[in-house]
Image (cartoon, grey):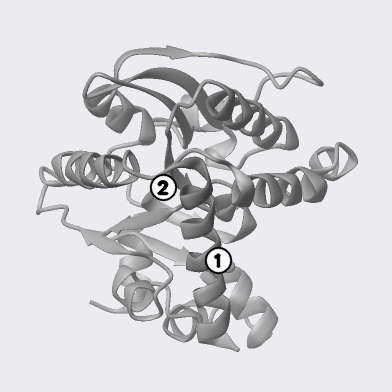
Amino acid sequence: MSAYKQVQLARSNQRPDAKAYIDFLIQDFIELHGDRRFGDDPAVIAGIGYFEGRPVTVLALEKGVDTQERLKRNFGSAQPEGYRKSLWHMKQAEKFNRPILCIVDTAGAACGIGAEERGQGQAIAENLWEMMGISVPVLSVIIGEGGSGGALALACANKVYMLENAVYSVLSPEGAASIIYKDAGKVEEASEALKLSAKDMLGFEVIEDILPEGEQFELAAPAIKAAFSRDLEQFSKFDQEAIQQQRYERFRKLGGHWA
């Protein structure tokens, strides 16, 4: 499969959305709204529930399943209030010692004038900074697109996984084609150059695991559940300092890999 075909598959309307995985994985989920500063952002689902009987905080970037919902959720591109909402929930999770489970599917953060006026860059930067020091386990899975800082703001985790047909990249192939080749039509070449597949990310040690999907995505939810279950059990044996240290070493190693 070519890189661009994989991008198209990652964007497919037939893929289960984040809410579908929450419904499968989390019992008694309660969604909470608002960032306590400006308003709510439907692109980010945030709440609490139980994973295999364990209280957890859940954060998800949600694209929506039809045209009306996708417009409402801005196609999964979060505004500053979405990232501030997620950060507030991370801090609450830390206060009450709840693990954090993140489900990522976004082409990138919202880039409109309003988002910039309300501090988009600062909101994302605060998430990156604060996530690195969170003292509870953070597990993130990319289920479709993992685009730029918009995805990374929910992926500064102890463990990151990708579904086998997901993609993870610093920017979209269309954006890369325009910037690198000065030709938006060279999207296939840009996709190849970005090395954005799950296999590429595993080779670069950006992620810990590739999770199988199956032909009709029938394996994806059980695979995510198994990965979360395995690693939450592992981190249950860690104290707070060890959890922070593991995350630090993970990203330190990644930085050294590219130095």
Q: Position of residue 241 (x, y in %)?
A: 53, 48
Instruction: Provide the residue designation for mark 1.
Output: 172
Instruction: Provide the residue designation for mark 2.
Output: 140
Question: Which residue is nearer to you in this view: 199 or 134?
Answer: 134
Tell me if residue 34 comes above or below residue 198 in the rendering: above
Tell me if residue 72 comes above or below residue 246 in the rendering: above
Q: Does the image show residue 145?
A: yes
Secondary structure under badge 1? loop
Left or right: 47, with 162 as reference point: right
Q: Identity of the amino acid at label 2? A: Ser
| Residue at horizontal 44 percent and vertical 18 percent from the top | 48
Q: Residues within 10 Å of mark 2 (few under 14, many from 20)?
A: many
- Which quadrant holds residue 162? bottom left
State how many labels appear: 2
Tell me if residue 213 comes above or below residue 226 in the rendering: below
Q: Position of residue 37 (x, y in %)?
A: 81, 21
Secondary structure under badge 2? strand
Q: Earlier in the sequence, mark 1 or mark 2?
A: 2
| Residue at horizontal 45 percent and vertical 45 percent from the top | 104
Q: Quadrant of the C terminus?
A: bottom right
Q: CA distance from mark 1 to mark 2?
A: 20 Å
Q: Identity of the amino acid at label 1? A: Ser
Q: Quadrant of the N terminus?
A: bottom left
